Amino acid sequence: MISQLTSPFIYLICGAIIAFVAAVCVVFMARAYRAGLMIGMDRAKLNRALTSSMTFSILPSIGILLGVIALSGSLGTPWPWLRLSVIGALHYETQVAQAAAEQVGLLTLSASAMTARAFATIAFLMSVCIMWGMILSFFFNKAYLKKGHLQ
């Protein structure tokens, strides 16, 4: 099973999604930088903001890398890489993966015990369960902000 989870096709799919998200980030970063220059912001301040933003993006990625390594033994590398690179959180991903594994009859997250059904269930739950934050924010943040909590 682990050979299927680490196949070149799965790497290609996950890599393409991660590359797309990274490209969108770069495009928005470049647009924001140019917009800052257009409204008269100091180039030195923009460069410092860019440097500090990159630093605060890179440092947390060390923990994410450890999470990818921890989950790759049981779920293959591409899926944890995708989940933790795009939207996942280490504590959430490992907790949901373990709970889902137990519900499909696995005693622990293990590549040797992984089945296609177990992986599909784990991947589905890891994806669906984290969507609620975005969905609820979409529908309720505007009303929440109107109440004056974060103005």
Image (spheres, rainbow, N blue to C red):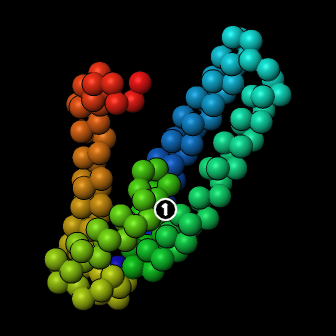
Q: In which quarter of the view is residue 137 placed?
A: top left
If the image is split into quadrants, where does the N terminus sit?
Answer: bottom left
Q: How many marks?
A: 1
The picture places residue 98, in percent across and down from the top left corner, at 29, 76
- Judged left or right of residue 52, residue 19 is left
Residue at the extreme right: 44
Residue at the extreme top: 39
Identify the residue at image location x=49%, y=70%. 67
Identify the residue at image location x=23%, y=85%. 106
Give the vertical position of 133 relative to 35 (above or below).
Answer: below
Residue at the extreme front: 148
Identify the residue at image location x=32%, y=71%. 95
Q: In which quarter of the view is residue 60 placed?
A: bottom right
Along the line of sight, the residue nearer the viewer: 117 or 52? 52
Instruction: Give the residue at mark 1.
Output: 81
Amino acid found under the numbered disc labelled 1? Trp
Identify the residue at image location x=61%, y=65%. 62
The picture places residue 100, in percent across and down from the top left corner, at 23, 72
Residue 7 visible to the viewer: no
- Judged left or right of residue 36, residue 97 is left
- Judged left or right of residue 133, residue 40 is right
Dot 1 alpha-carbon crowd within 10 angstroms: few under 14, some 14 to 19, many 20 or more: many
Give the vertical position of 104 relative to 113 (above or below).
Answer: above
The picture places residue 44, in percent across and down from the top left corner, at 83, 28
Along the line of sight, the residue nearer the viewer: 71 or 116? 71
SS class, disc 1: helix
If the image is split into quadrants, where does the C terminus sit?
Answer: top left
